[in-house]
Amino acid sequence: MLFDSTPSVAALLFLTLATTLKLILSTFFYAILFHAILSWIQPGYSPVSQILSQLSSPILRPLQRAIPPVAGFDLTPLFALIILQFAMILL
């Protein structure tokens, strides 16, 4: 593309797939981040908190089974954010 040539269909498909994956990972990242911040600011039931919980649960549930709470604190959002950031860097 730098030399004014047309990209191949495979290259376009790969770039589209990578961009879509990065968008999905970013959505998970910000949903987990906002859910964690909201749980500190307003603990308890909130419609926004419920939506963010539903968005972030596919990432957090497997980690919650593997990582136990430490002194009553759930550290899985921290590990999930690190894993998601690492995956975005790899893309």
Image (cartoon, grey):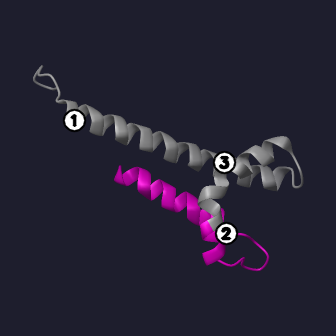
Question: Residue 55 at what x, y percent from top left?
Answer: 66, 48
Question: Residue 74 at what x, y percent from top left?
Answer: 72, 69
Is 7 in front, or is 3?
Answer: 7
Q: Residue at x 57, y 66 (%)?
A: 79
In this rendering, is residue 42 above or below 1? below
Tell me the number on the disc at residue 11. Answer: 1
As drawn, is 88 to the left or to the right of 55? Answer: left
As drawn, is 68 to the left or to the right of 45? Answer: left
Dominant SS in magenta? helix
Residue type (three-letter) at the residue carrying disc 3: Leu
Quarter of the figure with the N terminus: top left
In this rendering, is residue 62 above or below 1? below
* Span colored in magenta: 62-91
- Closer to the observer: label 2 or label 1? 1
Question: Residue 49 at what x, y percent from top left?
Answer: 79, 47
Whether residue 65 appears in magenta in the rendering, the answer is yes
Looking at marks 3 and 2 on the same chain, the residue that comes earlier in the sequence is marked by 3
Residue type (three-letter) at the residue carrying disc 1: Ala
Tell me the CA gap for discs 1 and 3. Answer: 30 Å
Is disc 3 placed on a helix, strand or loop? helix
Tell me the CA gap for discs 2 and 1. Answer: 39 Å
Question: Residue 28 at what x, y percent from top left?
Answer: 58, 48
